[in-house]
Amino acid sequence: MNHDLKDMTLEELERIVVGLGQKKYLAGYLFQFVHAQDGRDLPALTTLSKAFRAQLAEQGYFISQIKVADCLSDPDGSAKYLFELADGERIESVLLPDEDRLTLCVSTQVGCPMGCAFCATGKIQFRRNLTAAEIVEQVYAAEASLVARRSSLDEEPAADSGPALETSNLKLETPEARPRITNLVYMGMGEPFQNYDAVMRSIRILNHSSGRNIGIRHITVSTSGVAPAIRRFAKEEIRPRLAISLSAPADALRDRLMPINRKHPLPELIDAVRAYQAETGQRVTFEYVLIDKVNDTVNHAKLLVKLLRGLMYNVNLIEHNPFAGCEFTGSSRDRIQRFADELKEAGVETTIRFRMGRGIKAACGQLQAGYQPRKPAEGTRGTARHQ
Ligand code: SAH
Ligand code: SF4
């Protein structure tokens, strides 16, 4: 049985508390302590009796934590965290400050099993799923490091580690005016819908009004196109925004770039999105990584418009970000602009995404957490590994 209190929803804590012969409302104190007050040690939870705290500890309950192993900041304001998990595995998260928003891009797996040809995370070996606690901890650990950073800046302005973030213009939500992450994107290492239960559990925890209370419309989950999971997601009561990484308008090309397409080809994916929209009335964002002369012609743009006809959507165009050993290069500014113009002329709301964090390898598709890329198996393109 899982004994990590950080991994549990309020309802699960209530069942545990009642099972231990205690009053149900005490679960609320526990949940608030862990998720609203950044509580890390049970002994510090003095609103619970000493006897109850001892009982929890005796039963093996604990509050997990992840370690900040490294933090790099980019002159553009973004920062990349390298976190070490309890078993020594490593993941990365990226902090993206933008006017009054502070967005964290979180990981959901160590590595990624999907093997997309243009993505650094897809080139390293998939190691394991993250727990919900490890996902929410990325938020708490990033916030805690910002607080530590700010107080060290107050004391000694020349400090040279940690993200040099200008937080004075951020919406500060707590009485002690500590910086809070306002938006979350599940776009770090891993495929969220291959770790569906832990991802949804982390969202329920982070969105809960007694915890961090991050608005559900401030959370976006991005999938490479696990069609059955999109249908399941449509039925969730607590449902964040949905983004879908497309990057090709036709099956043959998408099969090559994103091996998930061989399992769930475009007609199946588009049908799932249609079903999702019939159920929820929500529009989706399609992400399209622009790779020089591979998927970036005007004809590709025309095919894309045709493919998505009848859906409610917008498109984010992302210039392909480079990494060592990648066979692709990003499209030129001109080609990106021509692609965007074609979409806009067809009436599609299109954004060219700002490539923050490139200098510290923190931009989309560059996260590798220091793991070595696996060698491609002989006779394959090295992209065929997925669940
Ligand atoms: N696995 C999920 C979420 C993480 S990837 C998914 O694929 O949707 C986040 C985004 O980065 C995806 O839209 C993906 O297409 C994009 N991406 C991957 N590699 C990239 C690269 N090298 N340059 C630019 N974007 C990339
Ligand atoms: Fe995994 Fe997303 Fe990278 Fe594909 S693009 S390998 S699904 S992280």
Image (cartoon, rainbow, N blue to C red):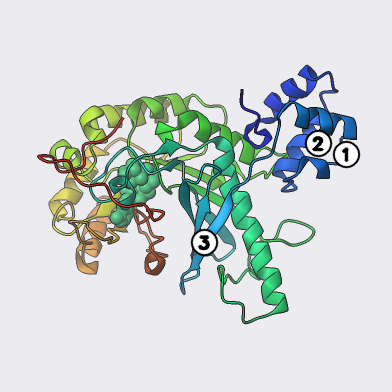
Q: Position of residue 228 (x, y in %)?
A: 36, 25
Which type of secondary structure does the marked residue at label 1 adopt? loop
Any mark on residue 248, and which?
none
User: Circle 3 is placed at which residue position?
Assistant: 70
Give the side of residue 337 with respect to residue 55, left or right. left
Q: Is residue 356 above or below residue 129?
A: below
Q: Position of residue 387 (x, y in %)?
A: 31, 29
Quadrant hosting ligand 2:
top left
Task: Tell me where residue 359 sits by quadrant.
Answer: bottom left
Three-letter code for the amino acid on which mark 3 is drawn: Asp
Q: Is residue 90 above or below residue 223?
A: below
Q: Going from the N terminus, do you reach mark 1 or mark 3 first?
A: 1
User: Circle 2 is placed at which residue position?
Assistant: 29
Pick out the residue farthest to the bottom: 158
Asked if labels 2 and 1 touch by Cβ distance under 8 angstroms, the answer is: yes
Residue at 64%, 68% (x, y): give it: 149
Which type of secondary structure does the marked residue at label 2 adopt? helix
Give the side of residue 132 with respect to residue 23, left or right. left
The mark closer to the camera, 3 or 2, is 3
Q: Using the numbered discs, state the Cα–Cα distance from disc 1 to disc 2 in whole angstroms.
A: 7 Å
Q: Is residue 272 above or below residue 45?
A: above
Crowd rating for badge 2 (residues with CA inside 10 Å; few <14, some 14–19, many 20+): some
Q: Position of residue 271 (x, y in %)?
A: 30, 27
Which type of secondary structure does the marked residue at label 3 adopt? strand
Three-letter code for the amino acid on which mark 2 is drawn: Tyr
User: Circle 1 is placed at which residue position?
Assistant: 47
Residue at 76%, 40% (x, y): give it: 32
Q: Can the viewer see residue 95 in this picture?
A: yes
